[in-house]
Image (cartoon, rainbow, N blue to C red):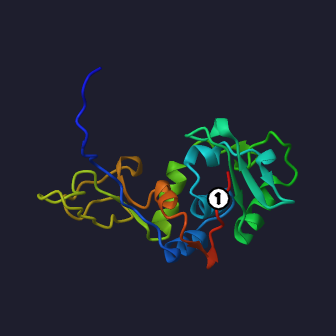
Amino acid sequence: MPKFPKNLKELNRRKGFVEEQACRKLAAHAQGWLRALPAVAYAFGFRKSELLNLRVRQVDLLHRIINLEAFETKNDEARKAPMTDEVFLLLQTFVEGKRPDDFVFTREPGDRVRSFREAWESLCCAASLGQQVCPICKVDENGAPKHFTMGTDKKCPSCKKRWKAKELKYVGLFVHDLRRSACATWFGEECPKWSR
């Protein structure tokens, strides 16, 4: 058996945390599934895959519980999450009229949400919780973040290079930051305790 050092340093750890005020900004700029998905992530700390794979049968509106099945979680442990009033109201609209095996988070006209990176980045930029920056000038000579507000023409005020929207680098709030912040509060309601 090979020997491994006991105290390996983990590099590039994310430290993002979402305060309640930031969640309110997100909520004010979001609509449809993009309004409900962050609410559930912030209230319960679900992973992105757990959110995107959530089925209607797992949302028990009668008992106000979300059931995560063991084979769908990273650690293979089933979990039950009692819904907050906010989450209950949001999810109610997404499960009505759907079959038990349908996905909860769907786009119009019912297509499953598989990826939402661009939608998330646009939402965060609209809520002033993120921005698109020049991929060249994103850090200074010391490696510290250097953020320039890009003009509508996508021209960097520092290097004067004009960029296409897909070439810009996103900096700001990440979906996983909601997971780290899960046991804070969602619009003043205490986060319910997990049950297993």
Query: Which residue is pictured at 54% across the width and 63% down the height?
Result: 182
**Can residue 107 be seen in the rendering of this structure?**
no
Seen from the viewer's position, the closer of residues 152 and 105 is 105
Total numbered circles: 1
- Element assignment for label 1: loop
Task: Residue 110: give x, y in percent of width and height.
Answer: 76, 45
Residue 79 appears at what percent x and percent y? 67, 49
Q: Is residue 141 visible?
A: yes
Q: Farthest top residue?
A: 1
Using the image, determine if residue 4 lies above or below residue 184.
above
Q: Position of residue 2 (x, y in %)?
A: 26, 22
Q: Residues within 10 Å of mark 1 (few under 14, many from 20)?
A: few
Residue under the image location 64 percent in, 38 percent down: 72
Residue at 29% across, 54% down: 162
In this rendered view, identify the residue nearer to me: 166 or 3: 3
Residue nearest the viewer, comparing 127 with 4? 4
* The N terminus, quarter of image: top left
Horizontally, residue 153 falls left or right of residue 183, namely left
> In this figure, which residue is indicated by the disc labeled 1?
194
Left or right relative to 174: residue 119: right
